Image (spheres, grey):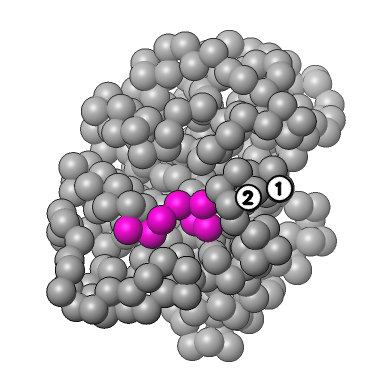
Amino acid sequence: MKSLDLIAQEGALSLGLVFPLEAYAGSVPNMDNQEALAQQAEAAGFKALWFRDVPFHDPTFGDAGQMYDPWIYMTHIMNHTKSIALATGSVILPLRHPVHTLKSINSLQHLSNGRIIVGVASGDRPLEYPAFDKDRNNRSALFRDNFNYLKAMQGDFPSHKSAYHGQLNGHLDILPKTKWSTPFIVTGHSGQSLDWIAQNANGWLYYPRGDYLLQVNMEEWDSALKRNNQPWKPYMQSLYIDLEIDRKIEASRIHLGFRANPDYLVSYLSHIKKSGVNHVILNLKFNQMPIDKTIAYLGKEVLPIFHSK
């Protein structure tokens, strides 16, 4: 899997960035200068750019993501970059028809020359399910059914019966075809057991946790892979940071991350690398230093420590 190889290697750690590449208050970003910042991130050595899937703006939730439809925005950024991996983080499978989802994936995979990684999830915003006439209490089964439908359609003229989306009888096929195998990364548990994730996904994406819970996650992930006779598969996590250049600044907590100097950041990344984390998605929403300067600094001072040439 070309795209997954770009960002995840056993025993190594790589860094990516999530859109918006912007610091902003509230839930709705401006999305200014994102194309130039994406190009800067690629030139600096970041391994992936991640795209959220947020169908509705729920002001009570406080996060509208990059606002744009992920497939359209990935296409836009694809046309402004050359080789960096482009990943969804994450597509809400139960709220999309799997045929349309795979049509978008295959189109982007073909047009990008194999740069696409698909993070998938069941969604965490309760108000969205009624808007799609979906029963949120059934989201685990919906997620699993959508996932299985996607996997079945990767063959030629597939036969598959879905509990929620009809059936394929071997007389229809999905175009375009792509020579690139698309990796699917499950976010959180998405209502599934870890055994199911180990068997069916190409990796596991989780949220930042304290050292004890991280160790528990890593041990459970390793055990699930071994128990299900699976090869090594990557473990990834998100992380909000507010980078302070002043090395005298002491680290402090922010939402799902920390405000800290570069020494602390490197120490943290080195520690979770030893724990087995393979890719970290940095979120700069709370960053106080200008984003272009932050990307440049990370590219010069942090990425070379973790990214082999």
> The N terminus lies in which quarter of the figure?
bottom left
The region drawn magenta spans 93-99
Of residues 234 and 151, which is closer to you in this image? Answer: 151
Residue occupying image coordinates x 54% and y 13%: 30
Q: SS at mark 1? A: loop
State the image coordinates of residue 40 (x, y, percent, origin top left). 38, 21
Q: To which quarter of the image does residue 238 belong?
A: top right
| In the depicted structure, whether residue 290 falls above or below residue 145 | above
For badge 2, the amino acid type reads Tyr
Question: SS at mark 2?
Answer: helix
- Mark 2, Cα crowd under 10 Å, few <14 / some 14-19 / many 20+, is some
Residue 122, above or below 23: below
Q: Is residue 211 magenta?
A: no
Q: How many marks?
A: 2
Q: Which secondary structure class fits the magenta region best?
A: helix
In this view of the protein, can residue 205 be seen by the observer? no
Q: Residue at x 37, y 78 (%)?
A: 161
Q: Is residue 95 magenta?
A: yes
**Badge 1, how many Cα within 10 Å: few under 14, some, many 20+?**
few
**Rendering coords of residue 114 (x, y %):** 24, 50
Give percent across and percent down for residue 77: 33, 28
Query: The C terminus lies in which quarter of the figure?
Result: top left
To which residue does mark 1 refer?
126
Residue located beneath label 2 in the image: 129
Q: Is residue 291 left or right of residue 47?
A: right
Please give the name of the residue rendered at 51% of the width and 52% of the height, measured from the top-left corner. 95
